[in-house]
Image (spheres, rainbow, N blue to C red):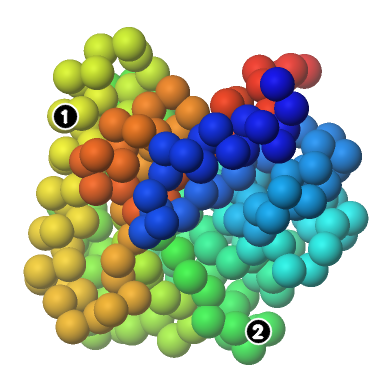
Amino acid sequence: MSIKSNILEVKKQIPANVKLVVVTKTMPVTMLKEAYDCGERLFGENKVQELVNKQNQLPSDIQWHLIGHLQTNKVKYIAAFVEMIESVDSLKLLQEIDKQAGKVSRNQKVLMQFHIAEEETKFGLDLSEAIEILQYLQTEPLLNTIICGVMGMATFTDDSEQISREFRNLKQIFETLKSIYFSDKEYFKEISMGMSSDFALAIAKGSTIVRVGTKIFGERNYF
């Protein structure tokens, strides 16, 4: 099937209130252009260098999401244009994002990443760490950063019950943080969870952003 038909098939399963981030990591620019020509404007990349390279070659109306682990020393390379950083997992990173966003006079949207999977390789906060960060920000607020919600990745497994449990956990984390720290903040509304193998389940559990690549572009070749 073509990229266009794959996108149409995926979008049939996504309600209007849920955003689709087309995950483009490792994919050549020619394939991204095909997705762009189908009307897609939200693209997600894992690595800063790849994101910068592709951003330089593609139309400026693309809204880029950084969805992979981000080192503080790489923030400056994307601060001028990235729409959302979904993978914030420390106070230090938040502060660097805030600093770099200030330098380019932008308000940077971010999500707090949570470790909801059983796999040790996944990055992310737990609830107590997030509360510690948000408590600190009560007295030392961010000036150029908007925390818009939460992000998480479920365990890579065929066990739908386990995946459902992990997605429910992230939804509960979101609701806890919303009630304590963001009850009057309309911008704190995003739950980014669900990828090619489990996005339908994620939507059923409350996801507002799904990150889909393989179902659109096919399997990736990692080198």
Query: Could you say which is closer to the camera, residue 35 or residue 78?
Result: 35
Give the amino acid type for the residue marked by disc 1 in the picture: Arg
SS class, disc 2: helix
Q: In the picture provided, is 181 more to the left or to the right than 25?
A: left
**In the figure, 140 relative to 122: above or below?**
below
Q: Residues within 10 Å of mark 2 (few under 14, many from 20)?
A: few
Q: Residue at x 17, y 19 (%)?
A: 161
Q: Quadrant of residue 101?
A: bottom right
Give me the disc on residue 103.
2
Give the amino acid type for the residue marked by disc 2 in the picture: Lys
Indicate which disc, 1 or 2, sits on the residue closer to the N terminus: 2
Q: In the picture provided, is 170 more to the left or to the right than 101?
A: left
- List x then y, in percent, for residue 124: 36, 43
The residue identified by callout 1 is 165
- List x then y, in percent, for residue 4: 71, 37
Q: Residue at x 66, y 18 (%)?
A: 219
Q: Quadrant of residue 159?
A: top left
- List x then y, in percent, for residue 12: 47, 39
- Which quadrant does the C terminus fall into? top right
**In the figure, 222 relative to 192: above or below?**
above
